[in-house]
Image: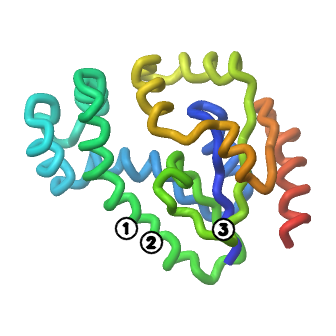
């Protein structure tokens, strides 16, 4: 099985590009959302760690946001609880798709959490900063302070770019990106 890891800045279009590959995608952000909505055990742990902020099940993203903005250390507390669960979900995904020729890992902290393997093919999604900011502002619950907190726990973009086997320039048009994906798939098969 070929594993493709998608790297890039927040809002660069990683999930958008990952879907265009046409292979099974593990999307860590979606998994976190599901954990907040459906996993009572996660709620209990977060409520215990952050009782002032995480008060009801299902967990509301606004509560998580408030806790992160209130104290820098809260993001680390949340990560400690959430990441092991996301990793379990990823392992289930990998087992389920082990016979597939290729899978895509859309995990924002892929390198930071040392989830990638040596043989993984890393693809960096490069987007113009102005386009990224425009797209981020369109997101529901956009908060520049939260985006900056998340950026601080990520490795520098230049490092991710250098570690990557390929770079996809994302101009947010399907045809242009599909052409680049086709080129990459031809190179790795």
Q: Secondary structure at mark 1?
A: helix
Residue 168 in percent (x, y) is at 80, 43
Q: Look at the numbered discs 2 and 1 and tell me whether their residues touch, using CB distance below 8 Å.
A: yes
The residue under the point 51% across, 62% down is 115
The residue under the point 31% across, 32% down is 61
Mark 1 surroundings within 10 Å by alpha-carbon count, few (fewer than 14), some (14 through 19), many (20 or more): few
- Classify residue 114 as left or right of residue 146: right
Cα gap from disc 2 to disc 1, whole angstroms: 5 Å
Return the residue at label 3. 3
Residue 137 in percent (x, y) is at 54, 16
Which of the 4 quarters of the picture holds residue 63? top left
In the rendered image, the quadrant that contains the C terminus is bottom right
Return the residue at label 1. 88
Q: Look at the numbered discs 1 and 3 and tell me whether their residues touch, using CB distance below 8 Å.
A: no
- Classify residue 110 as left or right of residue 90: right
Q: Look at the numbered discs 3 and 2 and tell me whether their residues touch, using CB distance below 8 Å.
A: no
Which of the 4 quarters of the picture holds residue 170? top right
Q: Secondary structure at mark 3?
A: strand
The residue under the point 35% across, 54% down is 83
Return the residue at label 2. 91
Cα gap from disc 1 to disc 3, whole angstroms: 17 Å
Picture layout, residue 69 above or below residue 165: above
The residue under the point 67% across, 78% down is 1
Cα gap from disc 3 to disc 2, whole angstroms: 13 Å
Residue 148 in percent (x, y) is at 47, 24
Q: Earlier in the sequence, mark 3 or mark 2?
A: 3
Q: How is the image coloured?
A: rainbow
Most distant residue in the bottom direction: 99
Mark 3 surroundings within 10 Å by alpha-carbon count, few (fewer than 14), some (14 through 19), many (20 or more): some
Picture layout, residue 12 above or below residue 186: above
Residue 85 in percent (x, y) is at 32, 60
Q: Could you say which is closer to the camera, residue 53 or residue 58? A: 53
């Amino acid at each position: 099985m070929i594993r493709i890891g998608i790297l890039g800045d927040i809002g660069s279009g990683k999930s958008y590009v990952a879907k265009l590959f046409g292979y099974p995608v593990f999307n860590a952000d979606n998994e976190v959302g599901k954990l907040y909505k459906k996993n009572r055990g996660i709620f209990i742990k977060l409520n215990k760690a952050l009782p002032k902020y995480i008060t009801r099940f299902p967990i509301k993203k606004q509560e998580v946001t408030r806790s992160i903005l209130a104290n820098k250390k809260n993001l680390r507390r949340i990560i400690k609880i959430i990441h092991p669960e996301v990793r379990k979900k990823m392992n289930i995904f990998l087992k389920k798709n082990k016979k597939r020729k290729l899978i895509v890992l859309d995990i924002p902290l892929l390198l930071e959490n040392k989830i990638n393997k040596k043989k993984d093919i890393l693809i960096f999604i490069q987007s113009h900063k102005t386009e990224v900011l425009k797209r981020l502002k369109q997101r529901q619950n956009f908060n520049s302070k939260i985006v900056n907190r998340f950026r601080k726990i990520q490795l520098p973009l230049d490092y991710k770019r250098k570690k990557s086997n390929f770079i996809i320039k994302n101009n947010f048009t399907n045809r242009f990106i599909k052409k680049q994906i086709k080129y990459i798939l031809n190179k790795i098969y």
